Image (cartoon, rainbow, N blue to C red):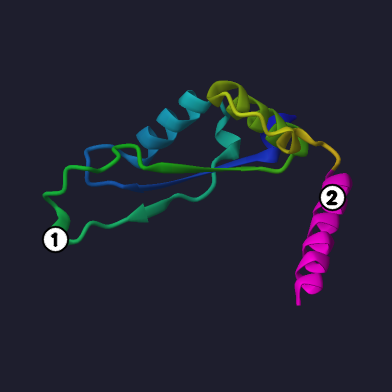
Amino acid sequence: MVSERICLSVNCFLNNGLTINEIHAHRLSLLELPDSVLRKPILNRSSRSSTCRRNTLPFGTARVVVHSTHIVQSIYGAIQEYSGLDRPEWLDCNPRRAESEIRQRVQAAAAASGSRS
């Protein structure tokens, strides 16, 4: 099941009239995820000097952790499609081949810098 490979944690302030349950419900409905993906929230406290601050995010920020190469590759593909980027290395599902290509590039760069000396 996909939701077993996803974790969601929220970092937020509670001085905006929303409860942590309302914030969690908002994030879960927005991301269409079940309650089982929730992890312990990080609750921030406002200092007295920043109580007048207006540029706060009412639902805080969310951190999504994905433990699936397939899901991550799908996310990267969606980012490329929405933004118009063309980065084929993002979609490479063979991590060993990607590691090998990186190793070859590092070796080539090291050899090139060594020949300049």
Say which label, 2 or 1, has the lower sequence index.
1
In which quadrant will I find the N terminus?
A: top right
Q: Is the Cβ of the residue at disc 2 closer than 8 Å to that at disc 1?
A: no
Q: Quadrant of residue 24?
A: top left
Instruction: Kindly identify the residue that appears in the image at 12 percent across and 61 percent down.
Output: 49
Q: Nearer the viewer, residue 56 or 108?
A: 108
Amino acid marked by disc 2:
Glu
Q: Quick one: SS at disc 1?
A: helix
Amino acid marked by disc 1:
Arg
Q: Nearer the viewer, residue 71 or 23?
A: 71
Give residue 88's position: percent from left, percent from top.
Answer: 74, 33
Instruction: Kindly identify the residue that appears in the image at 77 percent across and 62 percent down.
Output: 109
Instruction: Sort mark 2 into few (<14), some (14-19) or many (20+) by Cα contacts within 10 Å.
Output: few
What residue range appears in magenta? 95-117
Q: Quick one: SS at disc 2?
A: helix
Instruction: Kindly identify the residue that appears in the image at 19 percent across and 61 percent down.
Output: 47
Instruction: Sort mark 1 into few (<14), some (14-19) or many (20+) by Cα contacts within 10 Å.
Output: few
Marks 2 and 1: which is nearer the front? 2
Image label count: 2
Residue at numbered disc 2 = 101
Left or right of residue 90: residue 31: left
Name, please, the residue furthest toward the front: 116
Left or right of residue 12: residue 32: right
Left or right of residue 25: residue 3: right
Name, please, the residue furthest toward the bottom: 117
Left or right of residue 80: residue 105: right
Residue at numbered disc 1 = 48
Q: Nearer the viewer, residue 88 or 112?
A: 112
- Judge whether residue 47 is colored magenta: no
In which quadrant will I find the C terminus?
A: bottom right
